Image (cartoon, rainbow, N blue to C red):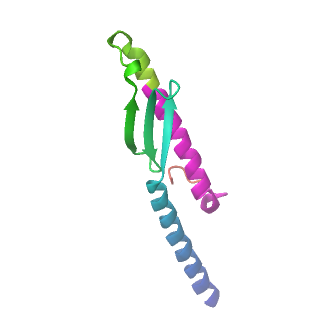
Amino acid sequence: MKNMNQLMRQAKKMQEELLKAQEALGEQIVEGTAGGGAVKIAMNGHKEITGVSISPDVVTPEDVDMLQDLIMAAFQDASTKVNELTEQTMGKYTKGMNIPGLF
């Protein structure tokens, strides 16, 4: 039983560390860009958009499609960066685990 208690303490400690790491991810901000920085999207580590910046140079009524493409590209860039940040932060806890949708 002594080993079981120790195992439970270790599991609880790991759970607490995981929660702290997840909280820290939410406080970190990455920026995705497109069009040479004409469109910027800021996103936290929980993939919540925290800001959008669009240069007036790319806002033309005649080319809305291009602006939409730039916004999507900036979002994809930010999302990729969040995925990399998540792997860096959470990877040490999840190495070898294959749990879809965990993070």
Looking at the picture, does residue 66 appear above or below residue 45? Answer: above
Residue at image point 59% right, 46% down? 84
Q: In which quarter of the image is residue 71?
A: top left
Residue 6 highlighted magenta (yes or no): no
**Residue 42: where, in percent of width, then height?**
43, 41
Q: What stretch is highlighted in magenta?
A: 71-97
Looking at the picture, does residue 37 appear above or below residue 3? Answer: above
**Residue 10: where, in percent of width, then height?**
59, 78
Please tell me which residue lies in front, 55 or 42. Answer: 55
Residue at image point 56% right, 80% down? 8
Residue 79 highlighted magenta (yes or no): yes
Looking at the picture, does residue 28 appear above or below residue 8? Answer: above
Residue at image point 53% right, 69% down? 17
Please tell me which residue lies in front, 12 or 26. Answer: 26
Q: In this view, does 29 lie to the left or right of 52?
A: right
Residue at image point 50% right, 32% down? 33
Q: Residue pushed farthest top?
A: 62
* Quarter placement of the N terminus: bottom right
